[in-house]
Image (spheres, rainbow, N blue to C red):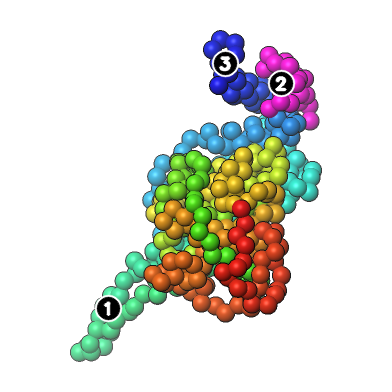
Amino acid sequence: MARLGRGLSRLQLQAQNRAKVLAAARAEFAARGFEGAKVDAIAERAGLTRGAVYSNFSGKRALYFSVLADLAEGAPAPRRPEPPATPAAALGAYARILLTGLPLTSEHGRLGSRLQQEILAEEATRSAYAQLLKLDAVVLGLCLEEVHRRGASAAAPRRVRSREPGSAPRVVRSPDPGAAPRMVRAAEAALTFLYGARQLADSAPGFVDPFHAVAACERLAAVADDGSWPPAYLPYAAEAVPCDRPWEPPPATDVLRARPARLGGADGVVAVLGLQRLEAVEELVRSAEPGAQVTAVLVSADPHELTPLARLTLAELRTCVSGVFPPETWPALRIVYDGTHAVAGAVGLDAVDDGTEAAVRIEAGRITAFAGGRGACHAAASSSATGPSAATAEPSPAATKPSPAVTRTSPAATRTSPPPVPAERPVPH
């Protein structure tokens, strides 16, 4: 590796300059706001040229998102929480953490006051942000379901004395602990309310009472599912293609838990999702067998602006989830950023964009099935009954549902066709 200056390698010098630019940008945005900040002023604060700023960041918006993402990721970790007794209590605790940064005065929170306007400025950022919040809702909803399940399980059968003398005690039984309702809709309602409260607190300081907002959010745990699960297109999704290829993923970090992901360490399902398809994570988790290791790998055609926005959104999610739910109540889901598209390459994709949806099943360190296009997460997660290890694997409930014969034409699209011949179907690389 080439070394420059005082013994620094090129990569080390680039990282050093990037850190200088971020520190200067943070100071400039705090002093002048987003509109008043200038790239030339940021370069001057950093002691670098304007070209050095643009060699690390594509523009002022990318810098802004990166500064906010760094702040969110550097927030102190909350202490390990006590398990919430009910979903309502969990939503109240989540609201307290999310609303902690409310701008109670017009000076407070100035650095992030421009975030919503910059998200709204471009269609790409709007649609990516919508899907990031969908992902937030899926993770929060799955945590709420586990709280409900544990609460039902804790209410074990108990005997109570009858009011009538001489009669036998009767048994009062708890609800079925496995019958937790789907709570993603309740999570979406809560996030809609809370993010709206944050925007109002910025535009109308003093109007939002955080304590009243927390109490109102607790009531949203009662929002019932609308019956839209599973999605209507799932039975028509292309089946996974059986294959047998080595699985050699690069090192990666689980951003939900802030620790190494060890993608090659266990059997499971790995999905590569563009930032326009993050809601498919719910299909990934619900279609997998209980206890299976599932990983969502996030990719984007515009990593300069959209990846920092994803980092910011998911850092806030991690802070809130880790402050409310003990780790044992989290879903068996890992989330990984793939800024270099190295994981996507290991999956077998030559190119990715924000609409990418592809998934592979991993067994014994090999890729045993591949699926691409809408419904790929469901197809790969439920493919064990038809994969190479079908003799020893039990089909998941989702895998037993009948589906019409379809074939995959590309990782981005599917269409109906006559029944395929699995042995002759090409495997993408």
- Label 3 sits on residue: 3
Q: Nearer the viewer, residue 68 or 360?
A: 360
Q: Residue at x 59, y 11 (%)?
A: 5
Confirm whether the magenta stretch covers residue 51: yes
- Left or right: where 109 falls relative to 249: right
- Left or right: where 293 falls relative to 104: left
Q: Position of residue 55 (x, y in %)?
A: 71, 26
Q: Residue furthest top?
A: 6
User: Which contiguous range is marked in magenta?
Assistant: 35-56
Residue type (three-letter) at the residue carrying disc 2: Ala
Task: Give the position of the N terminus as an image quadrant.
Answer: top right
CA–CA distance between discs 2 and 1? 75 Å
When the figure is inspected, residue 28 is found, relative to residue 201, above or below; the finding is: above
- Left or right: where 88 falls relative to 236: left
Magenta highlight: main SS = helix
CA–CA distance between discs 1 and 3? 77 Å
- Label 1 sits on residue: 160
Looking at the rendered structure, the secondary structure element under dot 3 is strand
Looking at the rendered structure, the secondary structure element under dot 2 is helix
Q: Residue at x 52, y 72 (%)?
A: 398
Q: Can see residue 359? A: yes
Residue 52's mark? Answer: 2
Q: Nearer the viewer, residue 420 or 15?
A: 420
Q: Nearer the viewer, mark 3 or mark 2?
A: 3
